[in-house]
Amino acid sequence: MSAILPHGGPFVLEVGSGHGHFLTAFAEANPGRICVGIDLEQDRVARSVRKRDRAKLGNLNFLRGDAAMLLEVLPAEAAADLIFVLFPDPWPKLRHHKHRIMQGHFLTSLANKTLPGSQLCFRTDFEPYFRAVEETIRAHPDWTLADAPWPFELSTVFQQRAAVFHSLVALRR
Ligand SMILES: C[S@@+](CC[C@H](N)C(=O)[O-])C[C@H]1O[C@@H](n2cnc3c(N)ncnc32)[C@H](O)[C@@H]1O
C-alpha cells in the first residue's frame, strides 16, 4: 500500500470502479489528488489500468479486490476524504439485500478510514436502494446527509444505461 499511498492520505476512493472512466477523468482533472479505485472484477480492473497508463497518470491506481477488505488492511494513518460509490449492484430481491455494499457496517468501516468533513457520494438508478441508503445514513452515528453539490460529473458505463438516477452526498460527522 505504501507505493499507492506514499504519504498515507488523504486520498480519493472509488468503490466498484468498474471500467475506470470516472476515476480516470477525476484523477486527470485533479492531478494533486491521490486516487484509488477498487473492483472485484479482474477484467474491469485491467481495462481501468490501461486507461490510466494511456493517460499517463501517476496519481491513480486501480486494485482488484473487495472494498470492505481493503478498508481493513489500509495503514492506520491512511484516510479517504472523498469516496464515490456509483451504481453499485442493486441486488433487488429482498433475500439478496444482504449482498448490497451500502449497509450500516460498511458505512462504519468507511467512517473508520475517513476524517470529519469527508464526503461520501452515492449514486444509483434503483430508487428502492437509494431510499434504503438514505434511511441507513439518517440512522448512522458517523454520517449525515448533506446539501452539498455533486463534486465531479462524468458519466459511468452504468450511468449511460440509466434513464434516471438518484444521488446523495453524505458528510462524515
Ligand atoms: C453495477 S457495476 C457499476 C460499475 C461502475 N461504478 C459504473 O457505474 O459503471 C458495480 C461494480 O461494483 C463491483 N463490486 C461489487 N462488489 C464489490 C466489492 N465488494 N468491492 C469492490 N467492487 C465491487 C462489481 O465488480 C462491478 O464492477
Image (cartoon, rainbow, N blue to C red):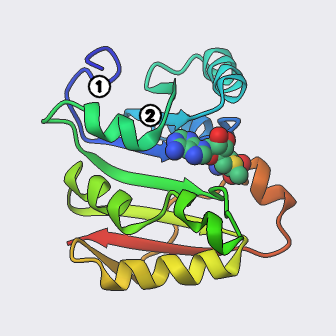
Left or right: residue 79 versus residue 21 is left
Q: State the CA–CA distance, disc 1 to disc 2.
A: 9 Å
> Is residue 64 toward the left or the right of residue 159 in the image?
left
Tell me what residue is drawn at x 56 percent, y 84 percent: 131
Task: Report how many numbered discs are placed on residues in the image.
Answer: 2
Q: Element under label 2?
A: strand
Q: Whole-percent x and y of residue 26?
A: 54, 43
Q: Vertically, is 51 above or below 95?
A: above
Q: Residue at x 43, y 66 (%)?
A: 103
Whether residue 16 is visible to the viewer of this picture, yes or no, is: no
Q: Secondary structure at mark 1?
A: loop
- Side of 159 where 136 appears, left or right: left
Identify which residue, 126 or 23, lies in the foreground: 126
Side of 166 relative to 82 (left or right): right
Give the quarter the ligand 1 occupies.
Answer: top right
Q: Residue at x 20, y 53 (%)?
A: 112
Name the quarter where the C terminus is drawn.
bottom left
* Residue located 44% across and 34% down the image: 36
| Residue identified by numbered label 2 | 36
Residue 121 horizontal/vertical position (percent): 47, 63
Which label's residue is closer to the chain start, 1 or 2?
1
- The residue tagged 1 is 5
Image quarter (top left, top right, bottom left or bottom right) of the N terminus: top left
Question: Where is residue 51, by image quadrant?
Answer: top right
Amino acid bearing label 2: Val
Query: Which image quadrant is residue 140 in?
Result: bottom left
User: Which quarter of the picture shows residue 126?
Assistant: bottom right
**x, y (%) of residue 98?**
53, 63
Please say if the residues under marks 1 and 2 sit with CB atoms less than 8 Å apart. Answer: yes
The residue closer to the viewer here, 38 or 82, is 38
Residue 82 appears in the figure: yes
The three-letter code of the residue at mark 1 reads Leu
